[in-house]
Amino acid sequence: MVLDSMGFQHGFFQMLALAKDYAIYVPDLLFFGGSATDSTERSPAFQAEFMAKGLKKLGVEKCTLVGLSYGGMVGFKMAEMYPDLVDSMVVSCSVMALTESITRSALERIGFSSWAQLLIPETFEGVKKIAELCTFKSLALPDFSLQRHFPGHVYKLQEGAS
């Protein structure tokens, strides 16, 4: 199972190569891509439970979990909660869990008040801020380009936003 960050499939071509010899599952984490729920729960534990239930419905008894960024945190929680399901892990660009000190320091440094505000922007300006944080140099992209790569299910485009 591949749990990527923010619904982006960075390793798409590697997954195609691996699919020749392995069953590859690349689900959207809840609230990323086209997935949603009525639950107000937003924790890695909730995501882990949802992913484990999905694998069990597919008949998967053991898996190797590949996690990137937030997907890695969900993967660590999944391995903790379902040790018989997660046989091994490959994790990159992640921490095992967000502590209060990590959270406070990181959010202050980048100018956000919560992880939800950063990870699930509700305005186009929030999307632009994420794009700026993810690049080494300032982006010289027109708004329509960002809108194309961050469709409406990632943020709620407010009327009048450019």
Image: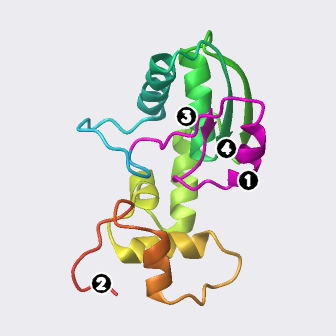
Q: First in sequence, mark 3 or 4: give its number.
A: 3
Mark 3 to mark 2: distance in Å?
33 Å
In the image, residue 38 lies at what x, y percent? 23, 38
Mark 4 to mark 2: distance in Å?
32 Å
Q: What kind of residue is marked 2?
A: Ala
Q: Residues within 10 Å of mark 1 (few under 14, many from 20)?
A: few
Q: What kind of residue is marked 4?
A: Ser
State if disc 1 and disc 4 touch (CB < 8 Å): no
Q: Is residue 115 left or right of residue 78?
A: left
Residue position marked by numbered label 2 in the rendering:
161
Residue position marked by numbered label 3 in the rendering:
74
Residue position marked by numbered label 1 in the rendering:
13
Q: Is residue 42 magenta?
A: no
Q: Which residues are magenta?
A: 1-30
Q: What kind of residue is marked 1?
A: Phe
- Identify the residue at horizontal 59%, vertical 18% (top origin): 80
Residue position marked by numbered label 4 in the rendering:
94
